[in-house]
């Protein structure tokens, strides 16, 4: 498959990096093969009720997987499950989780254990994320993009591992190549306005890169892959109208196309453990100057998130 064979070492210069993400992405974005089948496999997708997450769930179910939709809203999760079940004949479940509250995350792990009934989860897709339009904090007082996009998924995976729910499975971590704007990922970042929210998102996506690298290092039994799905018209940064919407639709891809690279990372054999897969650049090998290549900061972030989540159930 051409996408898997292509390996790129990208520039760390921001305009060049962002241009590589957008230029001709409709043409360059791959389509995930229908094989191999996933019959008998069990998958969990956070934020699986809408957008890219819903399309990832649909793609996994179409290949025969049993899928657990982890989402904040029961009604939309149930609607998604019923719709995909009717379309594919697969079995779907729902688990409620509010990633802005770590107590909800730990409760969701209890719910996952009840749903799985001793079965191991084969695929976990850390998909859910927010792009804040104004400064906000989580239930535990952490900056909201860090809390939802980075810390909550750390806690979810760590608790699942502790319960033996993911003994030797595959973990797919969604990021955004916009992470290259950032150099830090911390819970106390303060900002004002939409520009600050964009930077908070960028920082959290850098955190996703560091988390994935450290998860692979600490748990070599897992297959960890990081996916940049594309610059997707999913309303992540809020609704746009008029001319701005026209420009957005010209430059961005739809959610079905955006699901393809994460699906490749979730389903295809012979991928590089810890590898970063980009919808337009393929398998990305990071230069030493890339902020995501700083393994000291990756280890420090892991320890910080462990400390922030200490004492949870």
Image: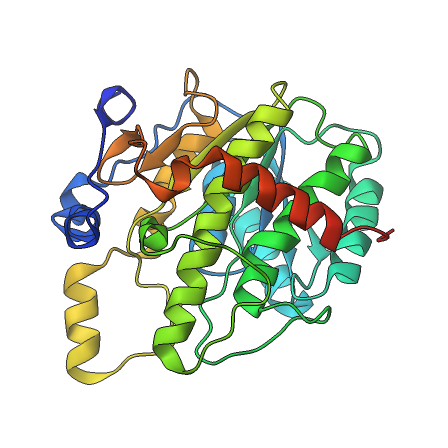
Residue 299: x and y in percent read: 58, 37
Up the image or down, 199 lies above or below 207; here it is below
What residue is shown at x 69% (from left), y 53% (from top)? 94
Above or below, 140 against 5 in this view is below
Residue 222, picture quadrant: top right
Locate residue 79, reporting x and y percent: 59, 63
Q: Is residue 38 above or below residue 92?
A: above
Can residue 102 be seen here? yes
Q: Is residue 212 left or right of residue 77?
A: left
**What residue is at 37 percent from the left and 43 percent from the top?**
291
x 72%, y 65%: residue: 101
Is 257 in front, or is 292? Answer: 292
Residue furthest out toward the top: 270
Task: Name the spot of residue 60 as percent of width and height, x first.
Answer: 50, 37
Is 62 on the left-hand or right-hand side of 115? left
In screen coordinates, is 93 left or right of 17? right
Q: Is residue 41 left or right of residue 2?
A: right
Image location of residue 270, percent across then percent down:
42, 15
């Amino acid at each position: 498959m051409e996408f898997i064979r292509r390996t790129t070492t990208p520039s760390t210069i921001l305009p060049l990096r962002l241009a590589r993400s957008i230029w001709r992405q409709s043409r360059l974005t791959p389509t995930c093969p229908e094989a191999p089948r996933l019959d008998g496999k069990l998958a969990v997708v956070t934020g699986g009720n809408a957008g890219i997450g819903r399309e990832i769930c649909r793609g996994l179910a179409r290949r025969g997987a049993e899928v657990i939709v982890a989402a904040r809203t029961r009604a939309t999760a149930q609607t998604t499950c019923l719709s995909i079940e009717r379309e594919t004949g697969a079995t779907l479940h729902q688990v409620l989780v509010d990633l802005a509250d770590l107590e909800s995350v730990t409760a969701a792990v209890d719910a996952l254990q009840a749903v799985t009934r001793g079965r191991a989860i084969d695929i976990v897709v850390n998909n859910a994320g927010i792009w804040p339009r104004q400064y906000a904090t989580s239930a535990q007082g952490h900056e909201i993009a860090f809390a939802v996009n980075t810390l909550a998924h750390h806690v979810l995976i760590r608790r699942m591992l502790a319960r033996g729910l993911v003994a030797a499975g595959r973990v797919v971590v969604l990021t955004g190549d916009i992470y290259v704007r950032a150099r830090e990922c911390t819970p106390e970042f303060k900002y004002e306005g939409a520009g600050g929210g964009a930077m908070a998102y960028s920082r959290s996506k850098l955190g996703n890169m560091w988390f994935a690298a450290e998860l692979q290092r600490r748990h070599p039994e897992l297959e960890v892959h990081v996916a940049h799905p594309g610059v997707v018209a999913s309303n992540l940064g809020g609704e746009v109208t008029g001319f701005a919407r026209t420009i957005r639709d010209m430059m961005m891809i739809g959610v079905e196309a955006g699901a393809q690279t994460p699906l490749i990372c979730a389903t295809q054999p012979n991928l590089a453990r810890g590898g970063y897969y980009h919808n337009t650049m393929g398998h990305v090998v990071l230069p030493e100057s890339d902020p995501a290549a700083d393994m000291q900061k990756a280890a420090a972030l892991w320890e910080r998130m462990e400390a922030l989540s200490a004492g949870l159930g």
